[in-house]
Image: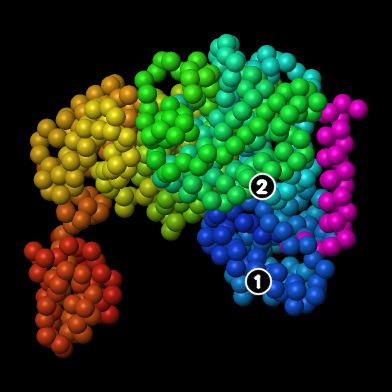
Amino acid sequence: MSAVAELRELGNRLRQQFSQNGRSKPRIIVGMGTCGIAAGAREVFQAIIQEVENRRLDVVVGQTGCIGMCQKEPLLDVQLPGGPRVTYGNVAVKDVPRIIASHVLNGKIVADLAVAYFADGGFHLEGIPSYDQLDFFKKQHRIALANCGHIDPESIDDYIAAGGYAACAKVLTEMTPEEVIAEVKEAGLRGRGGAGFPTGLKWELTRGTPSDKKYVICNADEGDPGAFMDRSILEGDPHRVIEGMIIGGYAIGASEGYIYVRAEYPLAIKRLEIALRQARERGFLGSSIFGSGFNFDLQIKKGAGAFVCGEETALMASIEGRRGMPRPKPPFPSVSGLWGKPTNINNVETLANVAEIIRRGAGEFNRIGTEGSTGTKVFALTGKIANTGLVEVPMGSSLREVIYEIGGGLPSGAELKAVQIGGPSGGCIPAHLLDLPIDYASLQEVGAMMGSGGMVVMDQATCMVDVARFFLRFTQSESCGKCTPCREGTKRMLEILDRICSKQGREGDLELLQELGEHIQDTSLCQLGASAPNPVLSTLQYFREEYEAHIRDKRCPANVCAGMRAPFEVDLAACIGCGLCARLCPVGAVSGERRKPHRIDAELCISCGACAEKCPVRAIAQGA
């Protein structure tokens, strides 16, 4: 029997075993990604263990990763023998005894906590939607996230039962490296962590460089504010990334690889360590994998949280033990990378697509998406959005579909103002471009970029000048300082923005911002520096009137910039003299005697609004 057939047979046996267990014992599965744990999932998990022990129940209690509905965390699944797997959302510790008493012991679903159920067993539950009926999932197409929320990320058997490592076995025993590269090229897979360089071409260039030693690296240094795609994949399905790296290593001729992951991701690191150990024990890493003669192993390198180490040459310098700073290219890593050897670098999401391409074929993959942007893209939905979380949609989906149909729109019917996409190096896309298709070319045309996949939604209460300043402050503070355009140029741009937001803006500032931004784009050493001005340039393009209001009218239209907010005033006729405002004011701007009207010193007031928010008779309001 071939290695592929053996692995498929093992997967079938494991699925049958899991199915038999599911028919014999109740199962309770808790979402234990970072988002779930932050919302209280660990306490819920412990409460379940305690309740099961107290009642002496024969119940399987397990864990899974994030399924994407972060706004519903903590999430908990209950499946009775022969019954549907039902998901409960926003579960608190106090809800655990009720769920166990009602559902686990008596088979009665707790309707007020139920979110959805998995309909893959042909079940139908009245009054509770199946997952494929939820707006959040209807338009998603999951490849990289296919197993997240479904399998135990710390169980290699769960991954094998889901078809894991079958692609690896096929590649190592039935395909040549050239055939693997050709399949990835035909699929049209492009890098999911930046500018979208074709993955197959990158592999081909690295393979074609003669060397006695080659390396493959997974870039998991996800440092963008509002981005958590890579973290969730590593926490929910680490073996998928490992399998992609083995296939990539075989294709380029590497025997060794590194997973460069930021130390701020302790749970991802823990599950990667478990997965690597399990893969070695099964013979999927090490010597002559699947008897093919191909030797390959991986190790984890923890990053120290420097944003610049997301740039590939800075990342390699960090692995080598040097300060993480970019170097000029060429030579590119495919020619001279880690320790001067040919090196291939892909990010987490890119590698998470590889096994699926091999398993299902390039044709299946490139039928999804658009001609120049095939497959799917994972996005982290954050900001002023009803359904925060992790989504995976076909390339070519519109921003409107993602924000309104999947994300549920803005809370309380607020009006959309802009979407910031692509991390701190991305651009801000205005509301009138909501029907823009999400693909590499379309985003570049409007001054944005795909980037890693952060998507921050902003409403009309957002100041776009302040947003540009926020992201530029991040990139400026994270600049490695090696090249003058990035080090000095971003600092000068930030100084101008600080002035504009403090009533000190002057004529010519906008032209200077434009000039500086374009100069930084053209002359910076690395792409992180070259893309740093993007938020400023895109907001200048689409929201110039807000900049002009700050400079000419000394006014922030969104009333956000502290240096421009009007001071608060007291309605003397309504004030009851309780003194609460004076006690709350952080700068001592409020004065007055007890039981007599109070006054606010306009010169001292910083317009924080603390007094107005707590005034019991609503006698305080912001001046015109």
Q: Quadrant of residue 189?
A: top right
* Vertical order, 388 against 210 (above or below): below
The amino acid pointed to by label 2 is: Ile
SS for callout 2: helix
Residue 332 position within the rendered picture, expressed as x and y whole percent measured from the top left: 45, 18
**Residue type beneath disc 1:** Ala
Give the crowd class for mark 2: few <14, some 14-19, many >=20 residues within 10 Å.
Answer: some
Q: Decide whether the magenta segment is chiefly helix, strand or loop.
A: helix
**Image position of 125 (left or right of 184):** right
Q: Secondary structure at mark 1?
A: helix
| Residue holding disc 1 | 47
Res 391 quadrant in image = top right
> What residue does disc 2 label?
274
Disc 1 crowd rating (10 Å Cα; few below 14, some 14-19, many 20+) is some
Between the residue at mark 1 and the residue at mark 2, the CA separation in whole angstroms equals: 25 Å
Q: Which region of the structure is painted magenta?
A: 1-28
